[in-house]
């Protein structure tokens, strides 16, 4: 199933102290890694939110409701997409493999749900990943309504917009993100040693 892919890059990166999108992992910026990951399974890719300088890496869709968290970026992307299904990944989650994206898209094709989210750590008590997910364009009206109502939590907004389905993955490390320089250094070290 063809879909568009969007890298969520509108965060302030306050705890990191610099724009996470421009951090380099093995010589490649996180925004480039995310775009490459999505381009393996998506017909077109773009960056949702983020600083104007990210335009050198790809099309940037401005966040028309800044300060509202990732829900604003998701809504902005869905307002501009021409595809029924749209994959999203945060710029600071660089280890999601192609197999995970394919599994999410496969579930989207088979379900009546408007959103399909990854769930890490197995079915029992798994951690829902609302930003590593596929959103149907049909979810836009409901998500926009929640955004304008000030209900910015993505999991709750998606549930209010329509049915949500899940794909369970055992691998927590695929969905690990970084918020501080220390976390980023630790992840780099583990990755270079073949762990995580």
Image (cartoon, rainbow, N blue to C red):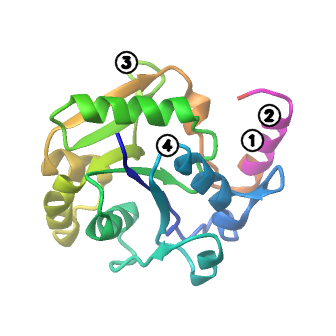
Badge 1 element: helix
The residue that label 3 is drawn on is: 123
Q: Specify whether 161 is left or right of 8.
A: left
- The residue positioned 34% from the left and 80% from the top of the image is 64
Q: Which residues are magenta?
A: 184-195
**Along the viewing direction, whichever of 67 and 191 lies nearer the viewer:** 191
Judge whether 97 appears above or below 88 on screen: above
- Please state, as top left, top right, bottom left or bottom right, where the N terminus lies in the image: top left
The residue that label 2 is drawn on is: 190
Q: Residues within 10 Å of mark 3 (few under 14, many from 20)?
A: some
Residue 122 location (% of width, % of height) = 44, 19
- The residue positioned 45% from the left and 33% from the top of the image is 102
Alpha carbon separation for disc pair 3 and 1: 25 Å
User: Does 189 lie within the magenta span?
Assistant: yes
Decide: marks 4, 1 in contact (CB < 8 A)?
A: no
Residue 177 seen in the figure: yes
Judge whether 128 appears above or below 142 on screen: above
Q: Specify whether 16 is left or right of 134.
A: right
**Along the viewing direction, whichever of 147 and 106 lies nearer the viewer:** 106
Q: Residues within 10 Å of mark 1 (few under 14, many from 20)?
A: some
- The residue positioned 72% from the left and 47% from the top of the image is 183
């Amino acid at each position: 199933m063809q879909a568009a892919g969007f890298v969520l890059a509108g965060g302030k990166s306050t705890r990191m102290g610099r724009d996470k999108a421009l951090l380099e992992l093995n010589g490649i910026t996180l925004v480039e890694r995310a775009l490459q990951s999505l381009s393996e399974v998506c017909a077109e890719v773009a960056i949702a939110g983020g600083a104007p300088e990210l335009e050198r890496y790809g099309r940037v869709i401005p966040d028309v409701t800044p300060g509202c968290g990732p829900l604003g970026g998701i809504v902005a992307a869905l307002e501009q997409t021409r595809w029924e299904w749209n994959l999203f990944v945060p710029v600071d989650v660089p280890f999601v493999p192609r197999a995970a994206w394919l599994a999410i898209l496969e579930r989207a094709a088979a379900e009546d749900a408007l959103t399909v989210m990854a769930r890490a750590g197995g079915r029992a008590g798994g951690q829902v990943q609302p930003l590593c997910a596929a959103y149907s364009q049909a979810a836009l009206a409901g998500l926009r309504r929640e955004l304008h109502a000030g209900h910015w939590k993505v999991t709750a907004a998606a549930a209010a917009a329509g049915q949500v389905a899940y794909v369970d993955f055992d691998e927590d490390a695929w969905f690990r993100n970084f918020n501080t320089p220390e976390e980023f250094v630790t992840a780099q070290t583990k990755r270079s040693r073949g762990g995580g």
